[in-house]
Image (cartoon, coloured by chain):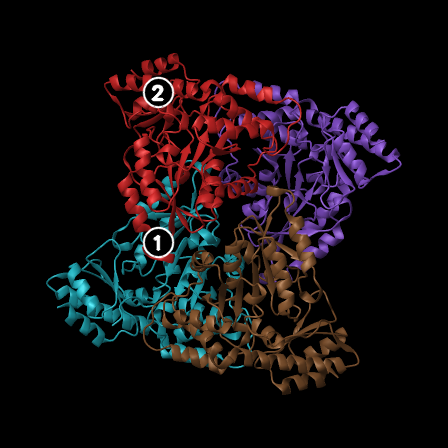
Chain colours: A brown, B cyan, C purple, D red
Amino acid sequence: MNFTSDNEAPAHPDIMNAVVAANEGYATAYASDGFSQALKERFSELFETECHVLPLATGTAANCVALAELSPPWGAIMCHERAHIHNDENGAPEFYSAGAKLMPLPGENGRLEPQSLARAIDGAGVHGVHNVKPSVVSITQETECGTSYTPDAIRALAEVSHERGLPLHMDGARFANAVDFLSCSPAETTWKAGVDVLSFGATKNGALTAEAIVVFGHPEWLEGMERRRKRSGHLLSKMRYVSAQLLAMLDDDLWLRLAGDANARAAQLAAGIGRHPSASLHWPVEANEVFMKTEPSRLAALKEAGFQFHRWPGHDDLARLVCSWATSEADVERFLQALD
Amino acid sequence: MNFTSDNEAPAHPDIMNAVVAANEGYATAYASDGFSQALKERFSELFETECHVLPLATGTAANCVALAELSPPWGAIMCHERAHIHNDENGAPEFYSAGAKLMPLPGENGRLEPQSLARAIDGAGVHGVHNVKPSVVSITQETECGTSYTPDAIRALAEVSHERGLPLHMDGARFANAVDFLSCSPAETTWKAGVDVLSFGATKNGALTAEAIVVFGHPEWLEGMERRRKRSGHLLSKMRYVSAQLLAMLDDDLWLRLAGDANARAAQLAAGIGRHPSASLHWPVEANEVFMKTEPSRLAALKEAGFQFHRWPGHDDLARLVCSWATSEADVERFLQALD
Amino acid sequence: MNFTSDNEAPAHPDIMNAVVAANEGYATAYASDGFSQALKERFSELFETECHVLPLATGTAANCVALAELSPPWGAIMCHERAHIHNDENGAPEFYSAGAKLMPLPGENGRLEPQSLARAIDGAGVHGVHNVKPSVVSITQETECGTSYTPDAIRALAEVSHERGLPLHMDGARFANAVDFLSCSPAETTWKAGVDVLSFGATKNGALTAEAIVVFGHPEWLEGMERRRKRSGHLLSKMRYVSAQLLAMLDDDLWLRLAGDANARAAQLAAGIGRHPSASLHWPVEANEVFMKTEPSRLAALKEAGFQFHRWPGHDDLARLVCSWATSEADVERFLQALD
Amino acid sequence: MNFTSDNEAPAHPDIMNAVVAANEGYATAYASDGFSQALKERFSELFETECHVLPLATGTAANCVALAELSPPWGAIMCHERAHIHNDENGAPEFYSAGAKLMPLPGENGRLEPQSLARAIDGAGVHGVHNVKPSVVSITQETECGTSYTPDAIRALAEVSHERGLPLHMDGARFANAVDFLSCSPAETTWKAGVDVLSFGATKNGALTAEAIVVFGHPEWLEGMERRRKRSGHLLSKMRYVSAQLLAMLDDDLWLRLAGDANARAAQLAAGIGRHPSASLHWPVEANEVFMKTEPSRLAALKEAGFQFHRWPGHDDLARLVCSWATSEADVERFLQALD
């Protein structure tokens, strides 16, 4: 039973079918094919506004191509101290930006907070050219703690950012899960709340490998992003296979249905843990990730029983359990029984 | 009729089937899955020596992750003046290497030549720290002119390189086509001839998107290459879908059969052009690319008749015609008839 | 009365005279002149061991040329959260290293502590290629809080570092002040305690502009450092004027006499503040910097009375007072009287 | 007798005196001192237009801070194939620009030519994001061949550049020598002819170490240049000593008098060589550098007789002789006698 990560699950059959279907005849290379060209219109519909879309293969690439465009080399990228871009990308944002600095900030339940963000931005540059210059704010939706930002929470951060001239980037590796949890429209949790660029994730949500940078407004950023995508080797020659996955995700709201299933399993898991006498939830469950606290020996026993999950580094008693579209109710049930 | 590029052709059904078959159950992420783990053994068999294999999604990434490991930022990467890494990757090698310089050299039919290579290396660093330092030699097999290096030609370049302490990299985006043309073993045209690192291309040869860095000897390079792959966003979480393509390529020599078909079509094309009164071959046809010279008006007419190909920049009378596994004898026949 | 920084003081006349004296006839360019060539022997004498010396013009360059050699782009540079390299160089280490990450650590009185350093190194890389890799430890001597590391304190950090394969760098912008305060030999507080590379500062100690990278052992680092110095524009063509300053500093221990004078003034200042009913020392005074806490109104009054100093950002009641060779006893006396 | 380079000559006494005079009392650090603050007005007078001035210590830094601001990482810096930035800075422009590509162009006597420049720019970007993008043109005044561009020649290049949206940078390491040779005003050979940024060199012209970036118009470039200067370690804390040199250079046209002396010696040398039966001038002498062709044995004999100069790499029969302010008529006379 695999709760290690949603990126260990297989791709959803509908996505796979779309890839197979895309394998028909010749297609112009380097994202000039029909699938890739259709993305702009389809995402603009989804987000209820004209947006620009750059498909690519990984979330790290999506985040870093975007952030490097938004931050000069002497910039500071403001993010939560648990952010994936800060901890899990081996310095990729620093690489892409030619040496910008990530400025990690605390915040409850994995969420940046407007006041501490404002203080951090205002305090960061007091010595002028001697300091790096806050240049962009990046938040993660769903966060690394399995929580989600409400549109209002995003709006408050966007206001702090925009008042200071900083754009707002959203790392949406699990964007679908947050949107499903919030029961809001994609627009409400992005540009309507002040998000300027979104890394739209599909891989963790049941694609093979498909992500997209979605830019709201700001056509002046496109050339740099396209150049950076090419120059980092992320302009796939046969992009049709990536774009076909993204299009299939949008068909009949497949992306939300898959995320909804994963979220439902996480909720089921959370409910079971909540009822357990010696296990508890470390952070609120607001999407598809569950952080469970329990005795180390119990965690070891679960591992031995064949359940797979991450034991949190530095915390003997903390496990991360991730649900995906492929997690079944029975899977969760078995886990909860084993927990007892 | 599409002769624009082998990367506009669809993926071969056997490759697609392998991707579909790989979509079974959970798999450890980030190239720790069974498919990815099998690559080392399979490539070691193919190359008749132990080698290390890093799968990734694009040729630019394969070239640049490898070259950045082999060249310090103050290095010079010696290559042919027509090399893809010099002309077609938007400065990707410079990006990955933190500013190394590409030193483009002339050479007939797209091939580097030992004497001019030796002269260039020897002359490049005479002013010590004031000059960049030649650090690696990169050749393309099949070359950008559609020619192939014989094992002896490679050996001569390797000797020049190794005597001067420089490793030899091979950009093998169309490696299969060269191996088929040369009727030699993969080993003979790589490590046995002195190649230290190969960018093994599968995408142009009928994969969806699959390339691999193959390292012969030199385990000391692996950590840096793995770090650079991760840091550039090329360590795909669901790498199984890439690795499955590579494995399928090796099954029953599919990679050579596909390249052989493409090469046969190019030979058929070349024969027809050779017989034509007012068309000629610009470079020898030694793999799957044909460079045809003819009157600009004739090229325009072919385009109008629906044939797709690149007109060579700066040369009104030059067309590049690329064959792939998907090119049929009838396709070529139709083109030759239209040419008349 | 200027207590703003020791880099606002003029150069000492002996240093200036040395520069004037160096202006005699022709000298080979780019650090091949006699002055620059003499540095190795003179510093080797001073440090009682063979060392290598690269003169250059600024402390930022000294730190970053050294650190970039010691950290790969995916490395983590472990340092105190108040370190100059982290806060005051506008991301220069990130620039020079092509995107390494600085990992700031807490520590009382501006000093790194062995246990938290060990924990930080051990915890940083648990996810392998997903994390940056701790690559070098950098400490500041005298620290940004005006304190000094004893040889034993350095040795403890060096042991933690070396056991984990990390070299130890010392930012010695105010190295002379620490050595004078500690009454130890330069050797004892550097290589004998485990320091591998020292940024030896002279500018703040009475030079016009002169710093040096001093490498203990490790000749394998020299090529990269020399290349990086050149490539960053820090290999001055007329290096003799820099090297002459460094040589003059070593003559008759001028460097220690100047630092000793500055330290004595700081001690005088500290004593006066210690006696004051409503002022106090924020950190121990162990070199030439004094951090004084007192009412904001008192600080404002001192400013108005013409005394110049930094009010610490984010701390209304904290002033930094820096003494230099040029600070006189009378200057300090006047300040203390004004404080009353 | 030293004809190796003007950077092996001592500093002129007037410059040294200015440095000594600047060593008076305290001065605000990091280019906020009175000397540095005076540069804008003094250079604006000299150039008869408002310009911005960033002092720094080396020509490589001046060139690269400027070029990195003018070229994105995916840019191409168009320059002559003999340019110092291409051949003699160890890849510094690539380092500063995070990997831009230098595009070396031929041109008689070391000068770029409008038609080939136009062709190169127009041809460079035909494949869009696959190619680097021409972003800035850089010329050297006086050139690496000892020739100078007339204002008309510059204007023609500026037109080609500006029509294509590229700014024009001038590497003026020996700007003074060109201005003296051309008998034109500094304005005529810079902004009036279309130059947007000048690296104004003083070091080779008799300073200790002093250069300046002079920006004509384009205040939008200043922040980036200031950030890059700091971040590369070129914002000297005691900048007053650099700025004082620059100011002294402008006093009573010292810079032109020194360059005029050097040029006169070069002309004297050229005249003598021109009269010699078996020596000749390789390039026209239009400033302070003389390229002499003669038998290798004669060059060897001159070396043996104690004359110092560069023998041109790859050319046995070619010597570069550089005159400086410190070269005397008698020096030249002795050389010419020895040549006989």
Relative to D232, residue A8 above or below: below
Relative to C307, residue C283 above or below: below
- Secondary structure under the numbered disc 1 in the rendered image: helix
Kindly identify the residue that appears in the image at 25 percent across and 76 percent down. B328
Q: Position of residue D235 (x, y in %)?
A: 57, 36
Q: Position of residue B185 (x, y in %)?
A: 34, 66
Which image quadrant is residue A35 in? Answer: bottom left
Q: With A40 as the anchor, is D163 left or right in this view?
A: left
Q: How many marks?
A: 2
The disc numbered 2 marks a residue on which chain? D
C108 and A18: which one is in front? A18
Q: With D170 as the anchor, is A205 left or right in this view?
A: right
User: Which numbered marker is on residue D266?
Assistant: 2
- Secondary structure under the numbered disc 2 in the rendered image: helix
Q: Position of residue A307 (x, y in %)?
A: 66, 79
Residue corresponding to mark 1: B87
Q: Please, what is the three-letter code of the amino acid marked with disc 1?
A: Asn
How crowded pointer 2 is (Cα within 10 Å; few <14, some 14-19, many 20+) is rated as many
B160 and C244: which one is in front? C244
